[in-house]
Amino acid sequence: MRRIFGVRTIEKSIDEILKNIPKIYFITMITLIMFHIAFLILLYGYDHDHVFGLSNLFDLDDEGNFPTWFSTINLFTSSLLLYIIYRVTYES
């Protein structure tokens, strides 16, 4: 690994971040699904409507919660990547 004044170069850091993005997305999706399943079990199995007010934050069928924000960030990221591809393709 190349270092300049004891600091890794920017290219290496960006490459490492880009390699980890699919893992981060996958782990986030699995975590949101697991929270949703846990709250469904608490709701239907143990008759707890609101567990400290968190059940609405992880409901996949509701709006204005963590899964909705995750989907919004996914759409924004994909549109940004498509714009970058467009600019690189037509500028060269």
Image (cartoon, rainbow, N blue to C red):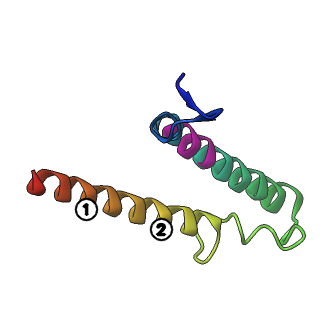
Q: Which residues are magenta?
A: 22-28
Residue sitting at 32 percent across and 63 percent down?
79
Instruction: Tell me the quarter of the picture where residue 82 sits.
Output: bottom left
Eyeballing the image, is 6 above or below 69? above
Q: Residue furthest front?
A: 5
Disc 2: CA contacts within 10 A as few (<14), some (14-19) or many (>=20)? few
Q: How many marks?
A: 2
Q: Position of residue 41 (x, y in %)?
A: 78, 53
Q: Position of residue 46 (x, y in %)?
A: 89, 58
Residue sitting at 77 percent across and 67 percent down?
55
- The image's mark for residue 72 is 2
Q: Residue furthest bottom?
A: 64
Q: CA distance from mark 2 to mark 1?
A: 17 Å
* Quarter that holds the N terminus: top right
Eyeballing the image, is 89 above or below 4? below
Q: Amino acid at mark 2?
A: Thr
Eyeballing the image, is 90 above or below 66? above
Q: SS of the residue at dot 2?
A: helix
Q: Which residue is mark 1?
A: 83
Q: Amino acid at mark 1?
A: Tyr
- Taking the magenta stretch, the answer to whether it contains residue 25 is yes
